Structure formats: structure tokens, C-alpha cells
Image (tube, rainbow, N blue to C red):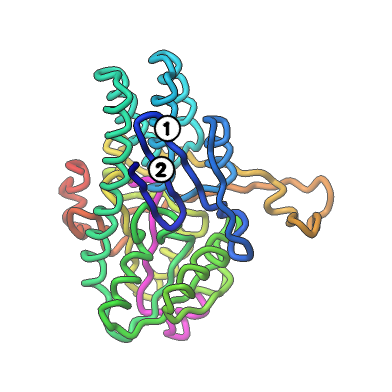
């Protein structure tokens, strides 16, 4: 038996059975509960509800789900249908689509369960390596004494490896650089406050949680020296989609002349997407803004019937980005203008 293990995903693999377990991220930081995923419907629900999240990890989890179905003697036609359903589970994160495209190609060209499983394992292993390379490239930009703002969650909860933007921060800390991290709470579902703070505390990296609207104030006080975020899709011109509020961070960094970096694997670059206007933006439920619910019940703070606009992502234009930190290299504006992302 082979076991794949990351901070938020585990998979036991043998010839006749694959068992997938996901850390339910909707319950963090108060409860660490693992879910066993037995059906495609369960995986799709986990992706849509953000029980599993982070563009790279969604792609990895979906690939393993296809492999699980393959060893269950699912017909080729049905497996392609289920793969398509996974592909459509979330519209913005292109990693999911790239991974499912790879799995679909394998199903069509070599419909053997072992070969399908091998590709899913390869996708997991690749993400681990991609994260290591992103961390190494990005840590070179972090200086001793930096006070770094980050947005959303981009660590081991979002990838199979150490993370993207948070992986950069993690390696810089391991290198002995004295850094401090300011964590935006981040909508939807306060993924910075719940998840990034949880990871940084486990890693013993000095950090402070702030509301998203506090970032510009801290910049004006010269309390932030760099900002680094992740991405769910990067267009070839350098525009990129990330959790809602990222655009605001970029605008505020530009005004205060603070370096603003985006860190992501090559699988986040959509070579069919020419600019940010082509990136679909996921809309989430109004109830996420109207109040909060949990084991304690439901609390509503918005008036009944008020209209809600709740996009999960916004698009940051390339002109606001200081550098794109990928696994293959760190690209500046000139590189991107000359088409560096097209070859990713």
C-alpha cells in the first residue's frame, strides 16, 4: 500500500481500493475533523463548500477522486462523465481544470486503472515539488526584518506541499530571517483568520491578525514592507484572480510604494486566457454575508431581504504586480510583457 499525506489530504492506495480523507477546513481552527470521501458527489460537495480548498489542492483532490472511481471498475464513459462533473465544481480555480484535463486525456488514451492512478499520484508529487521551488524563488525576495501582509490562505491547507505565498514565508522563517506576518481575515469564510493564523501559529511564525480594512492603515504607518498573495488563475498578460480583497491590497501597496508579489505554480497560469476580463468569477451564497451559522445556531446581522453581492474573487491587473513568483522562475513586468507566462 502507498500512502500520500499532506496537511489537509491523505490517500491510501492499493491495486483495488483508494481511500481519500480530507481535513474539513470549514471547522478549523476549533475542530480538526477528517472526512472519508467515498463518492464523487461527496468530493464535489467538499470542493463547493470549501471543506477542501486552495486551487492546487482542489486539483490534486479531484485527480485522486478520478483514480478512486477508476479502481472501482467504473466504465470509461461513466468515468469521463464524473470527471466532467468535477471539472465544473468551481469556476475560477484553473488548477482544477488543468488536472482534470490531464486525467481525462489519460482515460481516453490508456484506460487502465493503474495508469490512471499513476497519473493522480504524479500530480500529487508534482505539487509538492512545485511548492518547494516557489518557496525557494520567493524566499530570495524576503529580507531580514520584513513585515509581510498576506491575504487568504496559501499554505499547506491549500496545496499538497508547503504552500505558495505562505510557503515563501515559511522558508524565509526557516532561513532565520526575522519576519512578522500580518494576516488579513479574508472573505469568504474568513480563510485568513481561521486558516492562515492556524498554520502560522503551528509553525511558530510571529503573526498578527487584522481586518481586511486595516491593511491600508498599517501601510500608512510603515508597518508593512511587502505583500505576498496566492492566485487561483493567472492570465498570460499577468492579470490574476485571487480571493476578494486582493485587488484592494494591490492598489494600497501601489499607493504606498510597497512591493506586491503573487506566488503560484505554473498550473495556475491559464495560457488560453489573455487577460483578467476573461476570468470567470464565482459568486457565493448571500448567507455568508448576512450572518453566521454553526453548532451554536444561526446569527443574522443583516436586515431580512437585503440584496447581497458576494463574489469569491477579484482580478488584480498586472500593472500593480511587482513580480510573479512561480516554480520555474521569478518574473518581473518586463518578462511578462515579453510573454514569459505564455510558455508556462
- Residue 61, x across and y down, in percent: 43, 41
Q: Residues within 10 Å of mark 1 (few under 14, many from 20)?
A: some
Q: Residues within 10 Å of mark 2 (few under 14, many from 20)?
A: some
Q: Quadrant of the C terminus?
A: top left
Q: Is residue 75 magenta?
A: no
Question: Can you see residue 164?
Answer: no
- Assign a secondary structure to mark 2: strand
Q: Foreground residue, 93 or 218?
A: 93
Question: Can you see residue 219?
Answer: yes
Q: Earlier in the sequence, mark 2 or mark 1?
A: 2
User: Above or below — where is 254 with respect to 89?
Assistant: below
Residue positioned 34% across, 36% down in the render: 99
Q: Is residue 287 left or right of residue 9?
A: right
- Residue 192, x across and y down, in percent: 52, 64
Q: Quadrant of the N terminus?
A: top left
Task: Report how far apart the C-alphas of labels 2 and 1 lie in the structure.
Answer: 8 Å
Q: Is residue 238 left or right of residue 297?
A: left
Q: Which residue is mark 2?
A: 12
Q: Is residue 227 magenta?
A: yes
User: Above or below — where is 172 with respect to 133?
Assistant: below
Residue positioned 31% across, 28% down in the render: 116
Give the residues drawn in magenta, as a range. Answer: 216-234
Q: Residue furthest front?
A: 1
State yes or no: discs 2 and 1 in contact (Cβ < 8 Å). Answer: yes
Say which quarter of the image contains residue 106.
Answer: top left
User: Above or below — where is 327 with respect to 185?
Assistant: above
Q: Which mark is residue 17?
A: 1
Q: Foreground residue, 246 or 36?
A: 36
User: Above or below — where is 53 with respect to 261?
Assistant: above
Residue positioned 34% across, 64% down in the render: 167
Amino acid at each position: 500500500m502507498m500512502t500520500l499525506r499532506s496537511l489537509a489530504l491523505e490517500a491510501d492506495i492499493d491495486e483495488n481500493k483508494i481511500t481519500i480523507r480530507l481535513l474539513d477546513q470549514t471547522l478549523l481552527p476549533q475542530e480538526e475533523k477528517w472526512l472519508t470521501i467515498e463518492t464523487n458527489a461527496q468530493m464535489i460537495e467538499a470542493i463547493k463548500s470549501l471543506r477542501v480548498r486552495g486551487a492546487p489542492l482542489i486539483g490534486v483532490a479531484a485527480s485522486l477522486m478520478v483514480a478512486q472511481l477508476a479502481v472501482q471498475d467504473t466504465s470509461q464513459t461513466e468515468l469521463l462523465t464524473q470527471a466532467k462533473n468535477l471539472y465544473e465544481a468551481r469556476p475560477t480555480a484553473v488548477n482544477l481544470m488543468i488536472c482534470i484535463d490531464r486525467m481525462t486525456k489519460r482515460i481516453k488514451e490508456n484506460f487502465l486503472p493503474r495508469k490512471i492512478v499513476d497519473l493522480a499520484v504524479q500530480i500529487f508529487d508534482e505539487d509538492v515539488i512545485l511548492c518547494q521551488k516557489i518557496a525557494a524563488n520567493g524566499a530570495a525576495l524576503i529580507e531580514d526584518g520584513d513585515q509581510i501582509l498576506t491575504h487568504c490562505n496559501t499554505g499547506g491547507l491549500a496545496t499538497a506541499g508547503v504552500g505558495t505565498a505562505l510557503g515563501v514565508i515559511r522558508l524565509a522563517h526557516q532561513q532565520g530571517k526575522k519576519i512578522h506576518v500580518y494576516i488579513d481575515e479574508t472573505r469568504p469564510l474568513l480563510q485568513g483568520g481561521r486558516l492562515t493564523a492556524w498554520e502560522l501559529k503551528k509553525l511558530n511564525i510571529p503573526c498578527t491578525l487584522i481586518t481586511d480594512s486595516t491593511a491600508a492603515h498599517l501601510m500608512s504607518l510603515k508597518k508593512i514592507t511587502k505583500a505576498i498573495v496566492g492566485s487561483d488563475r493567472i492570465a498570460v498578460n499577468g492579470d490574476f484572480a485571487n480571493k476578494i480583497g486582493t485587488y484592494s491590497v494591490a492598489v494600497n501597496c501601489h499607493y504606498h510604494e510597497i512591493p506586491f508579489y503573487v506566488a503560484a505554480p505554473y498550473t495556475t497560469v491559464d495560457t488560453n486566457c489573455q487577460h483578467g476580463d476573461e476570468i470567470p468569477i464565482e459568486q457565493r451564497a448571500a448567507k455568508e454575508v448576512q450572518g453566521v451559522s454553526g453548532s451554536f445556531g444561526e446569527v443574522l446581522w443583516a436586515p431580512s431581504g437585503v440584496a447581497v453581492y458576494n463574489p469569491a474573487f477579484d482580478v488584480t491587473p498586472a500593472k500593480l504586480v511587482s513580480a510573479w513568483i512561480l516554480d520555474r522562475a521569478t518574473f518581473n513586468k518586463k518578462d511578462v510583457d515579453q510573454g514569459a507566462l505564455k510558455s508556462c
